[in-house]
Image (spheres, coloured by chain):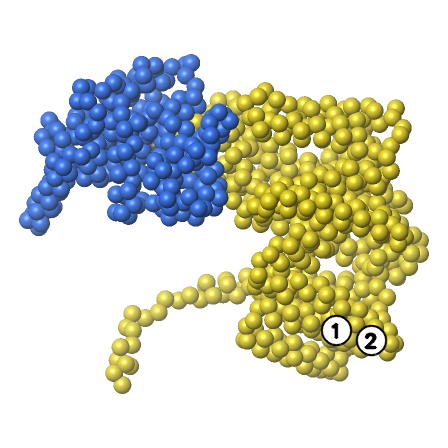
């Protein structure tokens, strides 16, 4: 054959070292991830009491809930080879898992607290489902379906956090602040939009500040207030309805009439819905907040989907899921399959800690953590971005100022490495003792944790600002923009996604910190959620740490695991929110 | 270098013919009355240093109003540096030091009391690489008027449309003003940057190799555009392309290595009959 003669004569270059390095690093990271994965599986098994889940029970929900979900995603993805691969993975995984377990259990030793069905669930079903959801949600049908479910869930979470917010903060103060501060400021802003050259355009912030001060002064003397429900309607439902009307007119390009109808409809939906819920025995205030959080985005999304004509079928996903769950419950109930009794359930996240494991809950610690983290996010974002902008855009390189900033720069890098107990000590000495902000109070904890993560946020924000290409700045300066205008209009918008990413990572660290909280005197256990920014709090990691020390095994396994899973879920929810915000920002022009 | 001399000569001749045809057609030069126009920018004995290194050496120049002035010269001879002196974009470079005199309508630009930001509002600039902001097309063009606080005084929509029309971009983008400026092609982006520069109606427009990243068709569009701009604006353009300089400019300044301004005269004169042998060598490609 003539082809054989054309064999290359220039030999080969050895890639041995590169290959060895590649596989070593792959092996190292896989080991790490697998170890973490096994730990999380055990924690989840404890938290949801899956040890006691009978195989029949698992099978029922697998068939009524998981398989329809996978089917929906496959239908959305509409890809034959994906269907084949999914079926192969699910079926082959089942056989492989069962075989592995029987071989190991009969020849090596029994595997503790893990049945092959549960292992199949975590090792095969969960990743396959996640992958299929990922693929399916990128097609129109899946995008609609998961968009809707996401809005319902996210909106409900938003509504619940509003409820928590108003249990912590005084809604009457908010009523005064809104009426005296926010509303006039918005009015001034609108006026100055119409007449940009009038001096009024400088006023919104002062007007708002004056209003807030007036509100806090008047809160005591005034003692006739509308009911909480009316306050929510006046301060939340009315502006949201107005915004909806405005958006409908502006973004969707509808007529004024349609826009007005949309606004009134939103108002009627939320107001009426909450009153209806009130007559059914649910608190109408809470119903209003949840409806506000979930109803508005859901309906707006649904309207948009119905108006477009791609992927409308996806709107049935929630029906599919709820129907599947109900069918599963019905079957399990009527056949009497033993169901697990999860530690992590509604009562765990809504009740206070207790001596008895069955009644122990995490509610005060969740509220404490979330409240502190919200403040930390705000503080560290503002401070971090501020310092980063100063260090990157405003300082000069030479002279005394230059030397000072170089010194600051080096020290920020060092501060990032200071152990967290040291920050705890700082918080104790500075905020709790010297400034008298209270031992273990929300303010002290938030300030301490903000300081703790400030170096990380500053450094990552600097990195993000530095990566904004210089030609954009040049372009802006050449248009006669000042440095502040350039920073505000060009640099920060470009750097914001990067800044978000850095802040998310830092917040993840802050929410899990225990040592500084112990130092500043946060409570190990509190029995009611904080009722203001000065009250003493506990935080999720503190409470979990305390449980790990309790004598009863139920605490050390069940309750502890439930706490860890809750902490992780809150963390993931926070990250997801930030990532969605970031992506929205990146995709928007 | 002495090899293949024949081919060299022929390509030289070709260049020269192209240049002279461009000059003879002379469309670009019948602008306004022939009497000498007012001077907008004057440099006297202008030196610029980056640290110890000298980038401009005793430059004297008078840039006429409502004319296109081309700046040509080999790489590294200080063309961009000179351009950045005019609107004080050099201020951002810490190592840069300017000596001598540079006047804009008779006022010394480097005087203590001059605010560079206010100066730049009178002198627009277009860069070599298209650099639209990652904002919508509309916001890009409106940027100058907004940051200059004039968005309320003028009809912003009309100003954006006028600038885009002047930049010969309106017909291509009028239906997508809300889409990102980065979604345009390179040539469109550059015309967007030109529209952005002229929207606030400056007096002078500085262009640093505005067509060097563009294909011939886009280049032709930008050149036509520059020709039109000269009716209202004073244009100073740096280019590496001799034909381009010959086609579009009224006056040509030749900088040579070391940052010297060697020749500054009517474009036709510089290309047909330069005073200096070094300039002739540079133009005919014997030295680069
Ligand atoms: N930011 C800077 N820092 C230090 N030196 C610089 C800087 N910018 C330019 N120079 C130096 O000044 C001289 C002139 O540079 P300039 O960019 O003005 O040249 P140019 O004529 O525009 O060249 P080109 O045609 O390649 O764009 C060069 O020797 C360059 O090394
Ligand atoms: Mg240059």
Q: Which residue occupies the foreground of this view, A453 or B133?
A: B133
Q: Is residue B41 above or below residue A178?
A: above
Question: Which residue does the numbered mark 2 point to in the structure image?
Answer: A331
Regarding residue B77, the answer to whether it shows in the image is no
Q: Is mark 2 within 8 Å of ligand 1?
A: no
Label 1: few (<14), some (14–19) or many (≥20) C-alpha neighbours in 10 Å? many
- Residue A84 image label: none
From this viewpoint, which residue is outermost toward the left? B6
Chain B appears in which tint?
blue
Identify the secondary structure beneath mark 2.
helix
Q: Is residue B252 above or below residue A552?
A: above
Residue A572: x and y in percent read: 69, 53
Give the left or right position of residue A296, taking residue A222 as reference.
left
Identify the secondary structure beneath mark 1.
helix
Work out which quarter of the rendered image holds the N terminus of chain A and state it: bottom left
Residue A357: x and y in percent read: 90, 58
């Amino acid at each position: 054959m003539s082809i054989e003669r054309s064999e290359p004569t220039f030999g080969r270059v050895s890639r041995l070292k590169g290959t060895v390095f590649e596989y070593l690093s792959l092996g190292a990271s896989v080991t790490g991830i697998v170890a973490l994965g096994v730990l999380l599986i055990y924690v989840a098994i404890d938290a949801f009491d899956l040890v006691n889940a009978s195989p029949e029970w698992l099978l029922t929900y697998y068939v009524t809930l998981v398989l329809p979900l996978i089917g929906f995603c496959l239908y959305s993805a509409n890809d034959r080879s994906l269907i084949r691969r999914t079926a192969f993975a699910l079926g082959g995984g089942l056989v492989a898992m069962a075989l592995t377990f029987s071989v190991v259990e009969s020849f090596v030793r029994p595997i503790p607290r893990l049945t092959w069905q549960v292992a199949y669930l975590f090792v095969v079903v969960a990743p396959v489902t996640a992958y299929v959801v990922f693929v399916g949600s990128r097609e129109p049908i899946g995008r609609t379906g998961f968009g809707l479910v996401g809005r319902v869930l996210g909106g409900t979470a938003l509504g619940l956090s509003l409820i928590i917010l108003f249990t912590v903060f005084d809604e009457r103060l908010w009523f005064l602040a809104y009426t005296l501060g926010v509303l006039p400021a918005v009015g001034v802003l609108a006026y100055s939009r119409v007449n940009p050259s009038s001096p009024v355009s400088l006023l919104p912030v002062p007007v708002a500040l004056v209003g807030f001060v007036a509100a806090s002064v008047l809160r005591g003397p005034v003692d006739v207030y509308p009911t909480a429900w009316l306050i929510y309607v006046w301060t939340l439902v009315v502006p949201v309805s107005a915004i909806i009307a405005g958006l409908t007119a502006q973004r969707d390009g509808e007529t004024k009439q349609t826009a007005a109808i949309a606004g009134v409809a939103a108002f009627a939906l939320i107001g009426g819905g909450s009153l209806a819920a009130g007559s059914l025995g649910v608190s109408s205030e809470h119903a209003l907040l949840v409806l506000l959080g979930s109803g508005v985005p859901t309906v707006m999304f649904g309207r948009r989907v119905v108006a477009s004509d791609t992927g409308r079928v996806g709107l049935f996903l929630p029906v599919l899921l709820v129907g599947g769950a109900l069918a599963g419950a019905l079957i399990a109930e009527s056949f009497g399959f033993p169901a697990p009794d999860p530690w992590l359930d509604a009562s765990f996240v809504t009740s206070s800690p207790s001596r008895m494991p069955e009644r122990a809950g995490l509610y005060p610690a969740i509220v404490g953590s979330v409240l502190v983290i919200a403040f930390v996010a705000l503080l560290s974002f503002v401070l971090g971005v501020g310092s980063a902008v100063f260090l990157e855009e405003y300082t000069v390189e030479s002279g005394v100022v230059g030397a000072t900033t170089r010194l600051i720069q080096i020290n920020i890098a060092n501060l990032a490495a200071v152990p967290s107990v040291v920050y705890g000590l700082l918080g104790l000495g500075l905020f709790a003792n010297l400034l008298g902000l209270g031992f273990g109070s929300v303010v002290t904890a938030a300030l301490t944790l903000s300081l703790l993560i400030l170096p990380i946020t500053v450094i990552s924000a600097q990195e993000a600002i530095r990566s904004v290409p210089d030609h954009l700045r040049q372009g802006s300066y050449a248009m006669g923009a000042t440095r502040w205008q350039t920073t505000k209009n060009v640099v920060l918008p470009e750097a914001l996604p990067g800044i978000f990413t850095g802040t998310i990572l830092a917040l993840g660290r802050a929410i899990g910190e225990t040592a500084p909280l112990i130092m500043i005197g946060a409570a190990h256990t509190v029995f009611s959620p904080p009722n203001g920014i000065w009250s003493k709090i506990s935080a999720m990691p503190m409470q979990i740490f305390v449980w790990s020390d309790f004598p009863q095994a139920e605490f050390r396994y069940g309750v502890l695991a439930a706490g860890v899973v809750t902490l992780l879920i809150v963390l993931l929810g926070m990250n997801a929110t930030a990532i969605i915000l970031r992506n929205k920002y990146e995709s928007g022009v | 270098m002495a090899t293949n001399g024949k081919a060299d000569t022929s390509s030289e001749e070709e260049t020269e013919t192209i240049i002279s045809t461009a000059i003879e057609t002379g469309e670009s030069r019948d602008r306004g009355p022939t009497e000498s126009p007012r001077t907008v920018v004057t440099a006297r004995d202008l030196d610029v240093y980056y640290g110890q290194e000298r980038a401009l050496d005793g430059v004297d120049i008078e840039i006429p109003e409502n004319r296109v002035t081309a700046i040509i010269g080999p790489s590294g001879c200080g063309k961009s540096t000179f351009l950045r002196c005019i609107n004080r974009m050099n201020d951002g470079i810490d190592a840069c030091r300017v000596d001598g005199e540079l006047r804009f309508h008779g006022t010394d630009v480097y005087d203590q009391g001059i605010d560079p930001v206010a100066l730049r509002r009178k002198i627009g600039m277009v860069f070599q690489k298209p650099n639209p902001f990652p904002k919508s097309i509309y916001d890009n063009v409106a940027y100058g008027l907004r940051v200059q606080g004039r968005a309320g005084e003028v009809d912003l929509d009309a100003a954006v449309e006028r600038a885009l029309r002047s930049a010969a971009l309106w017909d291509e983008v009028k239906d997508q003003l809300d889409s990102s400026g980065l979604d345009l092609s390179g040539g469109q982006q550059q015309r967007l940057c030109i529209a952005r520069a002229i929207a606030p109606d400056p007096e002078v427009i500085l262009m640093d190799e505005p067509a060097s990243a563009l294909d011939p068709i886009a280049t032709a569009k930008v050149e036509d555009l520059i020709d039109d701009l000269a009716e209202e604006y004073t244009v100073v353009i740096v280019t590496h392309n001799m034909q381009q300089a010959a086609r579009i400019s009224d006056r040509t300044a030749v900088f040579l290595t070391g940052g010297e301004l060697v020749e500054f005269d009517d474009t036709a004169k510089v290309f047909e009959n330069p005073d200096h042998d070094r300039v002739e060598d540079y133009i005919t490609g014997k030295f680069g």
